Image: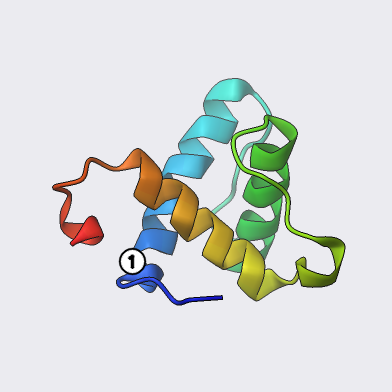
Amino acid sequence: MKKLKNEKELLKEAIRVGMIYAEKRGAAEFEKSDSQQLKVEFLYRLLVHDKQIQPLAKDQSGYQEMRHKLAIWISKLLPADHPLNQ
């Protein structure tokens, strides 16, 4: 797994956008007290279910891999000239 440049910031943006997506879809309502791990796992599973991202292999489905997959997802959605894609 190759680390992305700005991966931490991309993950924050992925969680923000993913939460909006999940709430508009009616799939979830997040609380401020929800942990980042809970949000990452939920958003990963939701995006796999909605066929927005490919699922990880069963032997690679850990928390770090889910974080990385969300960062890749948002980096592809952002415009090429976005500061996080530089």
Which element carries disc 1, helix, strand or loop? helix
Residue 41 image-quadrant placement: bottom right
The answer to whether residue 12 is left or right of residue 86 is right
The residue at the point 58 percent across, 33 percent down is 22
- Residue 19 shows up from this direction: yes
- Residue 13 lies, with reference to residue 17, above or below; the image says below
Q: Nearer the viewer, residue 83 or 17?
A: 83
The answer to whether residue 82 is left or right of residue 77 is left
Label 1 sits on what residue type?
Glu
Residue 32: x, y in percent? 53, 56
Figure quadrant of the C terminus = bottom left
The answer to whether residue 58 is left or right of residue 62 is right
Q: Nearer the viewer, residue 55 or 64?
A: 55
The residue at the point 13 percent across, 47 percent down is 81
- Residue 6 lies, with reference to residue 57, above or below; the image says below
Q: Residues within 10 Å of mark 1 (few under 14, many from 20)?
A: few
The outermost residue toward the right is 58
Q: Nearer the viewer, residue 11 or 19?
A: 11
Coloring scheme used? rainbow
The outermost residue toward the top is 25
- Residue 67 lies, with reference to residue 21, above or below; the image says below
The residue at the point 57 percent across, 65 percent down is 67
Residue 27: x, y in percent? 68, 30
Tag count: 1
Residue 40 image-quadrant placement: bottom right
Residue 31: x, y in percent? 58, 50
In the picture of the structure, the residue carrying the numbered disc 1 is 9
Figure quadrant of the N terminus = bottom right
Residue 9: x, y in percent? 33, 66
- Residue 35 shows up from this direction: no
The answer to whether residue 54 is left or right of residue 78 is right
